[in-house]
Amino acid sequence: MNAAAADAGIVVVGASLAGLRGAEALRRNGYAGRLTIVGDEPHRPYDRPPLSKHVLSGELAPNATELPELLALDADWRLGHAAVALDRAARTIRLGDGTDLAYERLLIATGAQARPWPDAAGGGLANIFTLRGRDDAARLRTALAETPRRVLIVGAGLIGCEAVSCCRDLGLPVTLVDPNPTPLARSLGTWVGGVIAECLRDAGATFHAGAQVLRFEGDAAGRVVRAHLADGRAVEADLVIVALGATRETGWLSGAGLMADAGGVTCDGACRVLGADGTPCPDIYAAGDVARWPNPFYGGRLMSVEHWGNAVAQAAHAACNMLAPAGAQQVYRHLPAFWSSQFGINIKAVGLTEGADAVAIVQGSRASRRFLAVYGRAGRSIAAVSFDQARWLPAYADAIAAGQAFPPIRDASDQGAFTPMAPGFPPARATSTHIEARHG
Amino acid sequence: MADDTLFSEVLDPANRADPYPIYARLRENPVSRQRDGSVVVSTHAAISSLIFDPRLSSEDLPPSRRPRTGNPLRDWLLNPIKNRIATAHRPLIFRDPPDHDTLRHAVMREFTVARVQALRQRIARDVDALIEGCVGRDEVCLVEDLSYPLPVAVICDMLGVPEADEPQFQAWATQLATALEPDARHDEASRHRTVAAFDAISGYMRALIREKRRRPTPDLLSALAAPGPGGKAVMGDFDLISTAILLLVAGHETTVNLITNGMLTLLRHPLELDRLRADPERAPRVIEELLRYEPPVHFRTRKALGTIEIAGRTIRKGTPVILLFAAANRDPARFDAPDRFDPDRDDNQHFGFGGGLHYCMGAPLARIEAEIALVALSRRLIAPRLLADPPPYRPGASLRGPENLGIGIDGIAPLPT
């Protein structure tokens, strides 16, 4: 290593939750060298979960979401310009303003970006929004405050459903369109998703199930006025929220000779990024949404986990490994978990529902919309979701982590009827090459 | 491992003044099986895990299991309403979800921060008047002079129970509180007294609720008795009666210990008493530390609905499980120097109000009452000193506190103007 690189210290690319918590973990674990944090947005790290909830509803100002810095970082913040290229031979990163930044070791935490609506199908029209960043939320909030005649939300995942819930709280007419039979079908299955379908109906939102938007149509001023669906129907709407998930921010790594694509940057179990030849780079790590790693909890299958808790845990873990000698790298194990709040319900989930062949209520009842359901796969408990029953979730998370039989914990106080149901997951998307755990 | 008899030492009144050395020995086995078949859980980690285990039920022994006549029909006909309250409509601390949740939500909707905060001035006036009553004396008997009458007056006011009726149900409340004490629960004669007290207080509450329906007043009981948005009562009459009894008894039997234990502890740590006197803003810290160090409720009993593996031990289905909150509060694995009274500790996740879904509903009220009382006592008692240490204790091992606390004084300072 040359002297210049050693002086360069550690560079964290990505100034969101994973980048911040990773940088803090470096300091907490005794790293006293130079620390640089690169972020494409001009903002200090902020928290995303409130954006689709309290910020949209107007209860929280977008700039009130800044994350607390848990310790003095003494870092050089390079905000407002994204990293656009990585030169591993020169050990530099090119930033959007053309400057080069040297590094000794690198933590990649560039996260993901909202999947946009294609321009060819009307994506360029005014009043079509995606929701990923704080500025997105601020623009959307302003547009919602102008009381649109009808809001159309495309995609009934967590973000889409939270947006519907907020819009109804604001009294705005809402239509939700999704190709699946119920909301949240991909993450929770149609059996549990059916509860959210009922909530949507009770809240007065319109849900077009099994429907797909083909294109948006604008008026003379270039503002969206309606959506055309694949079945020939049209939905009049003057504000559209496109909530079709996210793609990983890996474009800047093309040509760097790393295993990276739109699905993430591939790491080994210790969060070290793999070179194109499949060997881990000793000086480049990744964490958070962008990192795809073999999770020992799932037999070492490659996965990326787009959840808040993973960003925190994986960044801290990667930071530890960055400071440890090559022989002392620890494998990262993670049981995915997420939460969402919508329609007055606090949803919390642990595990991955992927591949589940059964689901059963183990606490509470579906009718009361207060329940805890466990997903099983080949007789094992693999995931649990709680609707307003989060107090019990840790007990079930332990059972899932221990790989207990399905259903687990049979003698509970508010025992639901163990009637295993088909969870109703839609067929996997042909484009899916790996598991993605999505967060809202 | 051999069954333990340590918990019987906890129950032994001879150890009431200082059960903490026994708790330390109990913590050596976080889940310790007792000779009577129950298990005692005493570490912070084990209790933290169990209070969120759905296999732990609060539908332990009913608080007042009625002596049977041997004829179920006769049992039923003799006193149907009271029977149903004692069995199917027990107070919610003895209930499990989902019924527990419904009742708790109904109470919490009315037991609001606003309602509690609105009592601040009233509590301060009461405290001043009670202390004023000691003017001219050289001794304060803290329990009868302040710790007992204050929370009773406050809960009566909040619930809407005429304070004039208080002497009537004072004995009932004390008897009903023994439902938390293992000794009393296993004692036939005490159980009969509990049943009688329950019958009497049920009748009283029933009449009072009827009156609240006829002439609603701006109190908690009127609010709970009023029809909900759909015109339907938020809870049925039997649940309403048992909930009202619970709130009344809890208001009688817990905060009294917090205030008395608090003054006792401060008098044993005069420096802390001085600091509180000089800086009343310290009160919240003092109260939190008191809740850890000398909590008003030391343990609660649950029952294992299934087999639970915890801390390397197995709790078998049907086992009574004693959650020894006060021992967890002194767990050195969780707290630095746990036996030191230190209001300045920042990490203070105590079980002073229990935990999990049965976490004390009255916590905000208890905090405010203790805060106002202790600050006032620190400022107005001149040269206070303990007349007996340890003081005599009430019988309860769970609801643990001094029977009386004699404090010698050189006078009462006038109210600051």
Image: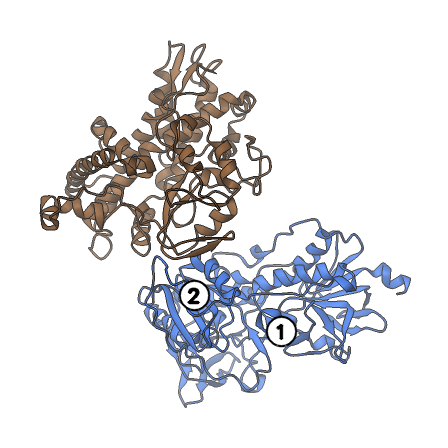
Instruction: Locate residue A315, reporting x and y percent.
Output: 66, 62
**Numbered circle sitting on residue A408:** 2
Q: Identity of the amino acid at label 1?
A: Gly
Tags 1 and 2 on a common chain: yes
Q: Is residue A342 left or right of residue A247?
A: left
Q: Where, by quadrant of the figure, is residue B97 drawn?
A: bottom left
The residue closer to the viewer here, B81 or A348, is B81
The image quarter containing residue B154 is: top left
Q: Which sits in the foreground, A218 or A248? A: A248
- The answer to whether mark 1 and mark 2 are in CB contact below 8 A is no
- For the rendered model, the colour scheme is by chain
* Chain name for mark 2: A
Kindly tell me whether residue A106 is visible in this rendering: yes
Chain letter for brown?
Answer: B
First in residue order: circle 1 vs circle 2: 1
Percent position (x, y) of residue B187?
27, 35
Task: Name the residue furthest right.
Answer: A3
Q: Residue at x 40, y 42 (%)?
A: B35
- Please give the residue where the numbered disc 1 appears in the rendered image: A300
The label shown at residue B45 is: none
| Image coords of residue A82 (percent x, y) | 71, 69
Mark 2 secondary-structure assignment? loop
Q: Chain A shown in which color?
A: blue
